[in-house]
Image (tube, rainbow, N blue to C red):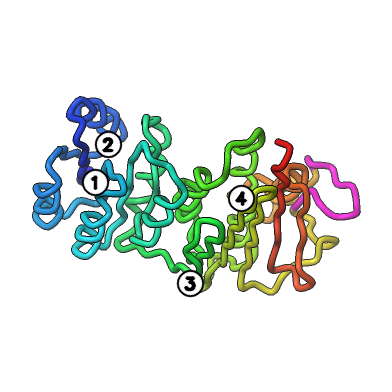
Amino acid sequence: MPSPLILVVDKDKTLHNSLKTQLAEKKYEVICTDDYNKATYLVEKEKPRGIVADVDKDDLSWVECVKSKYTKPFIAMSKNNEASFLVELIKRNVFAFVHKPIFEDTLSDCLKCCIEFDDFEWNILSGFERWLEIEIPSNSNYINAYCSFIIHMMPEFKYKKMMEYAIKELIQNAIEHGNKYREGSVVNICFLKTPTLLMFMIKDQGTGFDMELLPHAVIGPQKKNPMDVLQYRKSMGMRPGGLGIHSVSRIADELIYNEKGNSVTMIKNIANL
């Protein structure tokens, strides 16, 4: 199988060789250019599996032009991580965001998810930086893509990386246990931000669950031995885990499920952090 072709667009030519080397080690074939007009031509001629491009506010019209010709995922790199700019990228169906300076693992993780798609589109229900609401298909490759934006839309505070873990865990639960990866099903993710708190509301289309009837998870009113939970999951052919919601409940200030059990609200107070 041929290596996936990635087009890298960056005005800083000094980055071309380092990115080529990094991506070649991950078995990607790479074309680099610092010319955005040439990049548009290469998109149509070479039909890369993914695009990684350095962009800023002045480049949004170019992003629109490329996305009108190209449905495969587009990864934006930038030193600009303002929330308003990130929302504009999402509105233009940019797949993921990498903040410069680039960390190799971050870009590799995005590309690994990126090449799984033949086409890509965000379904945006609210596109404000203080109220971002989207729907995603029941596909785990969307999780890192979503979090690549949302981690920068949250203000800096002590437990930011832990919040990222909690968000990923809740979305994965909605996809895996709620929708059961059912084709055509979606997960609704709503992010609200105020000066004093962050709120995430995640809703799946499943039948819900009862906290007392989850033998595969270390949660609920009954104390469960984590090793017993791991053994149960193994016997049922499930992936290792079971500690997710328990961990999330310790990260969040409030974790509230609706009566049906298919929607969860996570609240983190940030006023004094």
Q: Nearer the viewer, residue 154 or 162?
A: 154
Q: Residue 235: x percent and y percent?
A: 70, 52
The residue that label 1 is drawn on is 4
Measure how far apart labels 1 and 4 are at the Cα level: 30 Å
Mark nearer the N terminus (2 vs 1): 1
Viewport quadrant of the C terminus: top right
Q: Secondary structure at mark 2?
A: loop
Q: Secondary structure at mark 4?
A: helix
Measure how far apart labels 3 and 1 are at the Cα level: 26 Å
Mark nearer the N terminus (3 vs 4): 4
Mark nearer the N terminus (3 vs 1): 1
Q: Nearer the viewer, mark 1 or mark 4?
A: 4
Q: Secondary structure at mark 1?
A: loop
State whether residue 34 appears in this view.
yes
The residue that label 2 is drawn on is 27
Q: Magenta region: which residues?
A: 217-227
Q: Residue 188: x percent and y percent?
A: 57, 67
- Pointers 2 and 1 in contact (CB under 8 A)? yes
61 to the left or right of 269: left
Question: Residue drawn 44% across and 51% down?
Answer: 145
Mark nearer the N terminus (1 vs 4): 1
